Every structure is written in structure tokens, then in C-alpha cells.
Image (cartoon, rainbow, N blue to C red):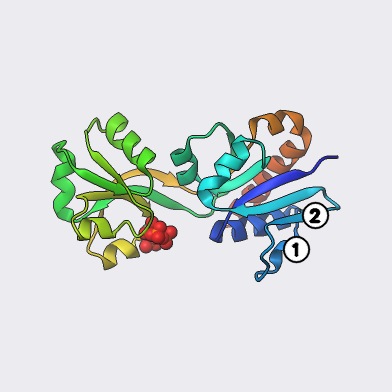
Amino acid sequence: MRYLTFALAKGRLAKKSLELFEQIGITCEEMKDEKTRKLIFVNEELKLKFFLAKAGDVPTYVEYGAADIGVVGRDTILEEGRNLFEVVDLGFGKCRMCVCGPVSAKELLQHHEMIRVASKYPNIAKDYFYNRKHQTVEIIKLNGSVELAPIVNLSEVIVDIVETGSTLRENGLEVLEEICPLSARMVVNQVSMKMENQRIMKLITDIKELLEHENTKH
Ligand code: PRP
């Protein structure tokens, strides 16, 4: 039996995914040591490997087959546009991709004005403004703390993730338009899906059953 390799997006999602996997018997003791600098973790018995990667790199590892399976946010999947199968909505990491800005920017969105849009997600922003709203805009790529952009007049609006809304509130900004809902997703390499179909389908079925069971509990 060959190893099945999992790429998990570093941070909150990885922790939640490992908790979920543990409940269906997929464990990795080595990974629980929070101080370790190791990059790859193995469960010899179950022939599984796990590694943590920057969220934006997870779809890349999965598309090329360096990982058979990935767990990453839908925001990253949409932004990266890689060839892979999105197989399960894991239901955690729920948030929304939105156009945000000061309330005064609302009319700029209604009148199709040529505005500047700052975002960590230039592809999602481009798709939304060009293909859905048919509004020509200038997209400015940023790497974080995007809420700063309208405050310092780098852009009129931003396209960003809103979870609790507190970052917006504390900075005098609002959700102006909603683009799409987001959550953590399990993705699979297209060749692995064929070559390791039984093992991967079992994993998908187990996770779906677990999620259904959890949903009926609440
Ligand atoms: C994300 C996102 C928002 C914030 C939204 O940023 O880009 O800034 O969280 O969460 P809230 O609605 O609960 O306030 P992150 O913390 O990942 O850091 P970054 O801004 O450096 O990307």
C-alpha cells in the first residue's frame, strides 16, 4: 500500500481538520507537538503522511499530486483556480467574501464608476467586478491588513473575508456587497481519485457521515 499524503492549510483550519480526522480514526500523534519544527509527519501503521503548508500553496501541492488530499478554505480554492476535485464542505471556518468600504462608497458600486479595489484575492475581485457586475475597476493586490486601504485612500473599496465583522466595525467600514459564502473544503488530486479510489472514497464517506451525524445533533 502506498502512502496517502495530506496537505493542510496552516493555522486554525489545520487544527480543526485534525480534530475531524481523528474522529474517523485518521490520527497523527507526531503532529500534536506544537513546538516541533518538523515539516512532514507520518502514520506508518495507516500509511498516511501529513504536512502543513501556507493556505495559498495547498491547491498547488494537490494539483501536482505532491499531496493526494488537501484541506483549505474555499477563498483560496477560488483564488488559485487549480485543477482539482472539491469533494467535501467541512462546515467549519465559515465566513463570507465581501466588498467592503466606508458607507460613502456604496454609490460608487451602483453607478459603475471606475474605482480602485484592494484585495489579497485579485482573481476573485476581478471575476466579481468584471464577470458578475460588469464594472471596470483597477485591482490592487495587497498581502494583509487590507482594511487599511480605504482608510488611507489607497482604494475606494476592498474585497476581503468577513467573519465576525469586528475588523470592519473597529475601522469604520461596512459590508457593501456580498460575493459568496466560504468554509473549509476537502480537495483531492484528480489522478489520486482514480488510482486510490477505494481509500479516498472511504475517507469521504466517513467524513460525510460524521458531519451529518454532528448536524443532526445540533
Ligand atoms: C482576516 C480578514 C479580515 C479579518 C476578518 O484577516 O482578512 O481582516 O480576518 O475577520 P473578522 O470579520 O472576524 O474581523 P487575517 O486575520 O487572516 O489577517 P490579515 O488581515 O493579515 O490577512
- Residue 184 visible here: no
For label 2, the SS is strand
Residue at horizontal 23 percent and vertical 53 percent from the top:
101
Can you tell which quarter of the image residue 62 is in? top right
**Relative to 189, is 12 above or below?**
below
Image quadrant where one finds the C terminus: bottom right
Q: Where is residue 128 in the image (x, y as percent from the top left)?
A: 32, 36
Q: Which image quadrant shows ligand 1?
A: bottom left
User: Whole-percent x and y of residue 125?
Assistant: 33, 40
Q: What element carries label 1?
A: helix
| Cα separation between marks 2 and 1 | 8 Å
| 160 or 118, nearer to the observer | 118
Residue 132 position by quadrant? top left
Disc 2 marks which residue?
Answer: 43
Q: In this view, does 203 lie above or below 175?
A: above
User: Where is residue 142 drawn, in percent x and y?
Assistant: 34, 51
Quarter-of-image position of residue 38: bottom right
Compared across the picture, whether 3 is left or right of 163 comes to right
Q: Please state which amino acid type lies under the numbered disc 1.
A: Glu
The furthest residue to the bottom = 35
Q: Is residue 163 left or right of residue 159?
A: right
Q: Do the residues labelled 2 and 1 touch (CB within 8 Å)?
A: yes
Residue type beneath disc 2:
Asn
In-image side of 46 versus 12 (left or right): right
Q: Residue at x 73, y 38 (%)?
A: 200
Q: How many labels does the image show?
A: 2
Question: Is 96 situated above or below 189?
Answer: below
- The quadrant of the picture occupied by the N terminus is top right
- Label 1 belongs to which residue? 30
Q: Circle 1: is it few (<14), some (14-19), or many (20+) Cα within 10 Å?
A: some
